Structures are given as C-alpha cells and as structure tokens.
Amino acid sequence: MGDRYGFYEVAIRDDYFSAGQTISPGDTVIDIGANVGCFALIAARRVGPTGRVIAVEPDERTFRQLERNIELNDATNVTARCVAIGGYRGSIPFFIRSDSALFNSIYSHPQHVAASRTVPMITLADLMSEEAIDACRYLKLDCEGAEYDIVESLTSEVSGRIAQITLELHRIQGKDPGVLRKKLQDLGFARASESGLLYYRRDPQGAAA
C-alpha cells in the first residue's frame, strides 16, 4: 500500500521542502498524487488548524488508506478527494501497476500493468472551484505523467492563484518536458531549483528564469 520509498522521499529525505519551498500557518495546499498521505499530513501540520490541505488520490484502494491515515492523525484540516486530475472533465482509464501503487497512472506502462479501471477526472480549475480555493500557496504534483495535462490546461487566471509548484517530471511517450517548462514560464513561474524535483515559484517580475 504505502511503499517505504514513498515515505522515505517525502518524510525523511524531505524532497518537497529541500529547495526553499515554504508553507505557513493558514496556507492552502493542493496535493495531487497524495498516495497514502505522507506529504499531505506533513503539510497539514505546517498549515495548522487555520489552513487547508486538499489531498487527491484516484486509486480507490490507496484512497481508503489515505482516509485512514488522515483519521489516525486527527488531520481535520485535510480534505481527501478520490478523483484523477487531468486536462478535461470526464472519465479516463486508470492503470494499476503490479510493482507499486506509487506508480499507478492514467498512462499505461505495459510491462508493469496488472489491471485497469475507469475513474472520474476533473481539471485543476474544477478542483479549485469545487473546493472554493481562491489562493493556493503550494501545489504538489506527483501524478505519474498527468503533470503534462494539468500544466497544459492551466490558464493565466488559475495559475495566478498559485504561488509555488513542485512537481516530479516523468518520461511519457509523446510528451515534451520542454513544452511543460515553457508553459510554466509563460504563466509567470520562475525555476527555483537546479536539480531533483522541479520547483517553481511565481516570479514577482513576471519573467521566468
């Protein structure tokens, strides 16, 4: 269920806060690809009772463990959503990996897929509207390829409400990482880290590095 490596990279190696990312009490955080909640629960402690964390996990089995971990940690400031986030509203095949739930994806990996099911999907704009999010301090994207569709669908209005984005970039056939980076730059985000995960923050000058 919750792979030890996922816990290690989030809770021990501190991947999502190792390049200057900040979360403060009262902030709103969106965690897309929440898995069993390692990052969401850390973020929940940082934002405190006046903040919010929206944790999104489309796999039903993993989602049940996410809900259980939220309950065990009494994280009443975390809202869990069992839905995929992508480029449009509708439904989409979701591929379950045989080697690790961490790698489940809307993109197929034939050598590892054990099963697939259809899941509901909405856009990031839909999520922010449904959860009444006016400002997101930190957007985490670890969604096994869906980051391309999510960034591609971003409008200037939606992205203007986001202060920081940390994402894990995956190799997906037919998707160009350079296009993703260019879109973020065009939306006014500056690259704030040179290695590891991609960390972008809104550039107050409106120009990306």
Image (tube, rainbow, N blue to C red):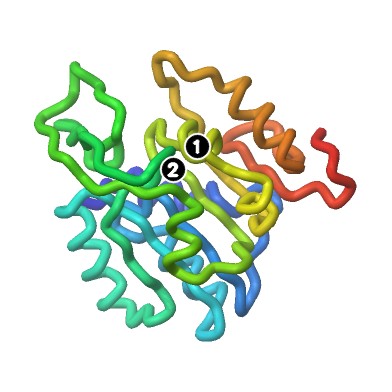
Q: Quadrant of residue 134?
A: bottom right
| Kind of residue indicated by mark 2 | Asp
Residue in the foreground of this view, choosing between 149 and 63:
149
Report the disc number at residue 72. none
The number of numbered discs placed on residues in the rendered structure image is 2
- The alpha-carbon separation of the residues under discs 2 and 1 comes to 5 Å
Q: Is residue 39 left or right of residue 184?
A: left
- List the single residue furthest toward the left: 115
Judged from the image, the secondary structure of the residue bearing numbered disc 2 is loop
Which residue in the structure is indicated by mark 2?
142
Give the quarter of the image for residue 208. Answer: top right
Residue appearing at x 27%, y 69% in the figure: 69
Q: Amino acid at mark 1?
A: Glu
Residue 79 falls left or right of residue 198: left
As displayed, is residue 186 above or below residue 5? above
* Residue at the image position 27 percent from the left and 57 percent from the top: 82
Residue 165 to residue 43: above or below: above
Question: Do labels 2 and 1 touch, CB within 8 Å?
Answer: yes
Packing grade of label 1 (10 A; few <14, some 14-19, many >=20) is some
Residue 192: tell me if it is visible.
no
Find residue 90 and report its horizontal and vertical position in percent: 29, 44
- Pointer 1 residue: 168
Residue 118, position as x, y percentages in the image: 17, 40
